[in-house]
Amino acid sequence: MIRQLFLIHRYLGIALSLVIFAWCVSGIVMMYFQFPEVTEEERVAGLAPLALEQCCVWPEDFSNIDIQRFSVEMLAGAPVIRLIDGFGEYVLELRNGRYLYEFDFDAANRIAADAAPRFGLGEDVRLLGLIEHDQWTVAGYDQHRPLYHFAADDGRGTEFYISSTTGAVVQMTTTVERIGNWLGSVVHWFYPTVLRQNAYTWSQTIIWMTLLSLFLTIVGLYIGFKQFKHRRNGRWSPYRGFALWHHYGGLVFGVLMLTWLVSGLLSLNPWGLLEGRGFFSETTAVRSGDMQLEHAQRSLAGIDRAGLPADTARLVGEFFDGRLFVTAWTTTGERTRFDGTTWAHAPLADTELAAAAQRLRPHATIVEHAWIDDPDAYYFSHHDVRRFPVYRVRFADGERYYLDGTNGQLSYAVDADRRGSRWLFHALHRGDFAAVVRARPIWDIMMWLLMGGVTIGAATGTWLGVERIARALRRVSHRRAARARATT
């Protein structure tokens, strides 16, 4: 039996050790390079201040559609309203009531020329083409395809993408980010475009590759402990050289490798594990009302009464407790809440949030609801940025809900599956155990030590596999040479 395990570990290791080594090295790179994205704060910072003197003209033939929220902003010098429902986004130009259902090359060029200086990209931009997807837009951009791909002459090699359906800047990368992610997330997530564009094939590839790696690691641990015993020559291991490093590295860091493989697998929620629910009913309960286009029309009819902050670049209208409220965003990211009917300043009151807490789950027991200014075990900034202060609602069954401190909307929620994901993935895979561990450079030092040890085990395993393949190729070459000499 032990001989069969040796053979399995040897030849499966030849096939998988390079994959595991690549996961380790790319994981270190990902500590410093996250997959590029344009955050909401960055999008708003790239908008022009609102100019609503010509607002608002509405289309006569546009039906009174149901929407979840609306957003008013400038687009290439013109005010537009973005109507967001559960399926997509409709864009109306507010100067003439025209429905902008698609954006052609001329429109995309105007938008790019207007947006680039506001994003700090300089005046010169050039259109690289109209694409369906590439490495940086392979997933999550379906509603925006095809995409206009632009390059800026800003000294950083910045490239950005404009949606052909909404006209928004939806993605942006720099040369450094692209190089870092080619070495990091693309390798770590098996993210090349040709594979990732098929979500099912990609996920199954990762899942089964990880399962095989788990099997390899478990067999390796068994063999490693089996071989670790005191011998007559005083040694505890029968190996030398790289094999000795692999033996001891596996013994010390093999369990950690096992932990990272399991937690990485769980991040994909295989077979529905730790997937969590969508919290649609709770989001709806907070809003407590159905918004339609006419709500936006009536609200914006009184925009001249609004005392908006200077440099307001976006207005976002949403229902809260059955009433329309509008949040004004400035280019610096500051947010102010207004009554959507009177346009009076309407900061959130504790009584409103307490009532919203009761609406979340009417038949569940609340054990605590209050403002928090600091991170807790489930709501914290590390890989993701969280806003504070936030209103936290905790229920007796362990579920937690976090209401935005400016508009009261549900910004994050934790059910049993998300609690599991928090500890089995975020803690075990990313080292997000507690605030003291997340603090840098403590986190960097910890992760470098742990990942360095695991990488040694993977690297020595890779080298041993390469050596074995090289020896096999040399034997084949020698046999061929011998046969050739015999025939001459």
Image (spheres, rainbow, N blue to C red):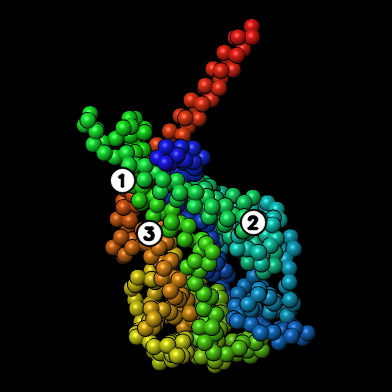
Which residue is farthest top? 488
The kind of secondary structure element at disc 1 is: helix
Q: Earlier in the sequence, mark 2 or mark 3?
A: 2
* Left or right placement of residue 322 versus residue 351 in this view: right
> Residue drawn at (22%, 29%), measured in percent from left and top?
233
According to the picture, the residue beneath numbered tag 2 turns out to be: 198
> Residue drawn at (31%, 52%), measured in percent from left and top?
446
Q: Position of residue 323 (x, y in %)?
A: 54, 91
Foreground of the two, 384 or 274: 274
Q: Earlier in the sequence, mark 3 or mark 1?
A: 1
Is the N terminus in the top left, top right, bottom left or bottom right quadrant?
top left
Is the C terminus in the top left, top right, bottom left or bottom right quadrant?
top right
The kind of secondary structure element at disc 2 is: loop
Q: Position of residue 420 (x, y in %)?
A: 41, 68
Q: Can residue 167 be seen here?
A: no
* Left or right placement of residue 247 versus residue 363 in this view: left
